[in-house]
Amino acid sequence: MNSEPTASFSGYQKLVIFLLAITQFTVILDFMVMSPLGDMLMKSLSLTPSDFGITVSAYAFSAGTSGLLTAGFADKFDRKKLLLFFYLGFILGTACCGLAHTYTQLVIARIVTGLFGGVISSISMAIITDLFGLQQRGRVMGFIQMGFGASQVLGVPIGLYLANIWGWEAPFWLVVAIALVIAVLIMAKLKPINQHLLIQREKTAVAHLWHTVKLKKHRIGFTSTALLSIGGFMMMPFGSAFAINNLGITESQLPLLFMISGLSSLLILPMIGKLSDKVSKFKIFASASVWMMLMCVIYTNLSVTPFFIVVILNILMMMGIMSRMIPSQALTSAIPEPQDRGAFMSINSSLQQIAGGVAAAVSGLIVSQPGKGQPLQHYDVVAYVIVGITIISIFLMLRVSKLVLSKESGQPAITST
């Protein structure tokens, strides 16, 4: 147990958490709504499955590229202004998605959206690290991660309902409407965040980027994040297909399955956040990782299963997957110094996006399907690969934890140079 008590939030800190959480909700919703809109988009724009796959991956790879390109500049500006700039660009890109009438226009719109939206998470992380102490960050991460669950429970169902009435463009206009209100609130309520500008060292963006990459402690954090993302994303691309073709879930039951798992995450994540602030963050991470490995192996070896059992196992598996993210993000956020946080978070976010794309590609090479409607094969192999990656992640996160503890205690860390 940590001897230092958890600190309570001030009124302004609660406002910041709300603004960042609802901002994250819109960004995640914009990304997640593409999958359930797949059938509607393919029919409306005469897309092939491979065309639709490109529209989805275009966002991820452009987001990853954007983070690397902006890393050198991320600590050169007031974080509030940087957040507003990229959020307004994200709104513009999402509006272009709603205006797209051809495959090419939609791909370009998704690239633009990814270029701006992919950086928002890293800016938010830098703001969190600037404004919240380490003993508060677990709870903050828990609330921010609720955007994922909220998008499943509220955003996706509402978006699909609007799409059925007004067409596939409607969910994108819903995101634009919500995001415009949030942008006004950020402009009016968020205070300037510019203390890091007083301690800048490098004169150029390239020098700052190189300084951020060359530090060994940063590379440990980057590697840990990449492996976590690969392990977390490998099962996602074929989750729906496995549930329908292997577990016997009907297409009408699938939205309910996702809604229940999203609702469970809304309840679980804040509790994990509080727990990670009271107990060793690494111990929470390691425990969640072991639990996730166990549940992934069990889940991927199932055959036709009653719906209520699938729901329970899905909740238990998601509990492990999501519970790793909160303590790992809290620990990783403590690695960089204030003047390097923006660049570090940008690179970290980029690697997360790119690793997710790599994970989906690797998963696609492993999984096969003999014919349309037939059960997926080798999905269990994906789980075994995740187990191997997760074991390595635990050892890497242990090194991150030691770095953070050394930094917090004021002792020099051997691996920091």
Image (cartoon, rainbow, N blue to C red):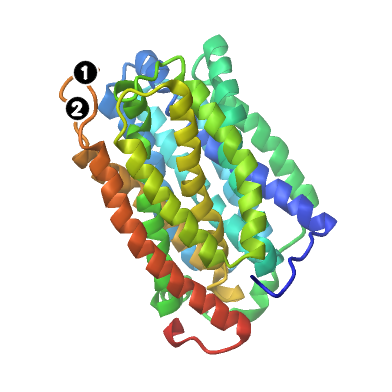
**The N terminus - image quarter:** bottom right
- Mark 1 packing: few (<14 Cα in 10 Å), some, or many (20+)? few
x and y, in percent, of residue 224 in the image: 40, 64
Q: Is residue 60 something one can see in this rendering?
A: yes
Whether residue 382 is situated above or below residue 389 in the rendered picture: above
- Name the residue at 39% across, 69% down: 396
Secondary element at tag 1: loop
x and y, in percent, of residue 305 in the image: 37, 24
- Residue extending farthest to the top is 165
- Residue extending farthest to the left is 370
Q: Are marks 1 and 2 in contact (CB under 8 Å)?
A: yes
Q: Is residue 92 something one can see in this rendering?
A: no
Secondary element at tag 2: loop
- Mark 2 packing: few (<14 Cα in 10 Å), some, or many (20+)? some
- Name the residue at 56% across, 34% down: 262
Q: CA distance from mark 1 to mark 2?
A: 7 Å
x and y, in percent, of residue 76 in the image: 58, 68
Q: What's the residue type where badge 1 is placed?
A: Lys
- Name the residue at 32% across, 16% down: 46
Q: What's the residue type where badge 2 is placed?
A: Gln
Q: Is residue 56 left or right of residue 268?
A: left
Q: Is residue 87 left or right of residue 185?
A: left
Whether residue 270 is situated above or below residue 298 in the rendered picture: below
- Name the residue at 21% across, 37% down: 378
**The C terminus - image quarter:** bottom left
The image quadrant of residue 241 is top left
Q: Which residue is mark 2?
A: 369
Q: On residue 372, which mark appears? A: 1
Q: On residue 124, which mark appears? A: none
Whether residue 168 is situated above or below residue 90 in the rendered picture: above
